[in-house]
Image: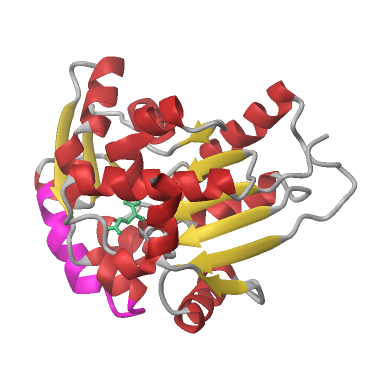
């Protein structure tokens, strides 16, 4: 039995879609979630810079005593997952791999689309993974720079989604990967724009299962008979985070604190 919490991080509120699945799968575990709002969005930044942020946050969470870290951000997973796994003293679970295999399983016409941030599209990990599983897939990737800022601001996304969906519809994709943890928050909009015949793939549930399996393999689960707790950290404004987080997670976020970017930088030094 291991009472240490699990650390989860993202550039903003997007990783809450992953945290939600973790809470469903592991209701007995404690979680600490960090949103790097002061430096959001990550998507337009160079991969090298995102890698540095991920190292700082990973180092900070590891130093604060978590037993496992979930990189609940596709941009950070794209930029840094192997390096985080190699350097941090605790297991690190990312996103991306489960979605790539789910998309290959789901497609009927072997045309797969990707909606993601610029960083995730540039890193090309989805395309590499999809082609490893089926080299014959026609893969179309569309960077969506407007979506994360609109979602974080709680603004309408319909027009932007229509714009980004058009090239995937034109390419005849029957399966579209939501390659950013923010996008499931606007799933109804995406599903309406793409229609019923296009399968939208987002696999936070798989990620949660991978976390649970890792803990079970190591014998690191918390007591099964307890109810877990969760607390939140942001480099931005805790009140803004609380308001948006409560709306998306439909949970009271009573414990939200601010952590300074300088503190994260110190953790990586
Ligand atoms: N949720 C992050 C992702 O999954 C958003 C990145 C950003 O801040 O642009 O990629």
Rendered image quadrant of residue 83: top left
Name the residue at 65% across, 73% down.
255
Nearest to the observer: residue 268 or residue 11 = 268
**Residue found farthest to the right:** 225
Rendered image quadrant of residue 219: top right
Image position, residue 78 (x, y; %): 29, 38
Rendered image quadrant of residue 106: top left
Name the residue at 21% across, 29% down.
127
Nearest to the observer: residue 30 or residue 100 = 30
- In screen coordinates, is 133 left or right of 33? left
- In screen coordinates, is 201 left or right of 16? left
Image position, residue 70 (x, y; %): 51, 43
Image position, residue 268 (x, y; %): 40, 46
Nearest to the observer: residue 152 or residue 158 = 152
Question: Is 154 included in the stretch rendered in magenta?
Answer: yes
Question: Is 269 included in the stretch rendered in magenta?
Answer: no
Image position, residue 81 (x, y; %): 37, 33
User: Is residue 198 shown to the viewer in this render?
Assistant: no
Image mark count: 0
User: Is residue 81 shown to the viewer in this render?
Assistant: yes
Nearest to the observer: residue 152 or residue 127 = 152
In the rendered image, the quadrant that contains the N terminus is top right
How is the rendered protein coloured?
secondary structure
- Dividing the image into four quarters, tell me where ligand 1 lies: bottom left
Looking at the image, is 164 positioned above or below residue 121? Answer: below
Name the residue at 33% across, 78% down.
153
- Please identify the dominant SS of the magenta region: helix
Q: Give the magenta part as a residue range.
A: 153-167
Looking at the image, is 36 positioned above or below residue 67? Answer: below
Looking at the image, is 46 positioned above or below residue 94? Answer: below
């Amino acid at each position: 039995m291991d009472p240490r919490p699990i650390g989860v991080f993202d550039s903003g509120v997007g990783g809450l879609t992953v945290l939600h699945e973790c809470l469903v799968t592991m209701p007995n575990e404690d979680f600490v979630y960090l949103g790097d709002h002061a430096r959001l969005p990550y998507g337009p930044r160079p991969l090298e810079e995102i890698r540095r942020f991920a190292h700082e946050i990973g180092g900070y969470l590891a130093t604060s005593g978590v037993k496992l870290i979930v990189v609940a951000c596709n941009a950070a997973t794209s930029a840094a997952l192997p390096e985080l796994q190699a350097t941090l003293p605790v297991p690190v679970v990312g996103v991306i791999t489960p979605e790539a295999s789910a998309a290959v399983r789901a497609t009927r016409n072997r045309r797969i689309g990707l909606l993601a941030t610029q960083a995730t599209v540039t890193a090309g990990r989805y395309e590499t993974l999809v082609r490893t599983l089926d080299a014959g897939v026609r893969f179309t990737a569309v960077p969506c720079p407007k979506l994360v800022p609109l979602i974080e601001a709680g603004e309408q996304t319909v027009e932007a989604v229509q714009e980004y969906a058009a090239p995937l519809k034109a390419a005849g994709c029957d399966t579209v990967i939501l390659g950013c943890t923010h996008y499931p928050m606007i799933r109804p909009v995406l599903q309406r724009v793409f229609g019923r015949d296009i399968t939208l793939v987002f696999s936070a549930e798989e990620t949660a299962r991978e976390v649970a399996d890792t803990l079970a393999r190591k014998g690191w689960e918390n007591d099964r008979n307890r109810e877990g707790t969760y607390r939140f950290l942001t480099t931005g404004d805790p009140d803004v985070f609380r308001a948006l987080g409560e709306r998306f997670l439909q949970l009271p976020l009573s414990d939200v604190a601010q952590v300074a970017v300088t503190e994260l930088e110190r953790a990586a030094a």
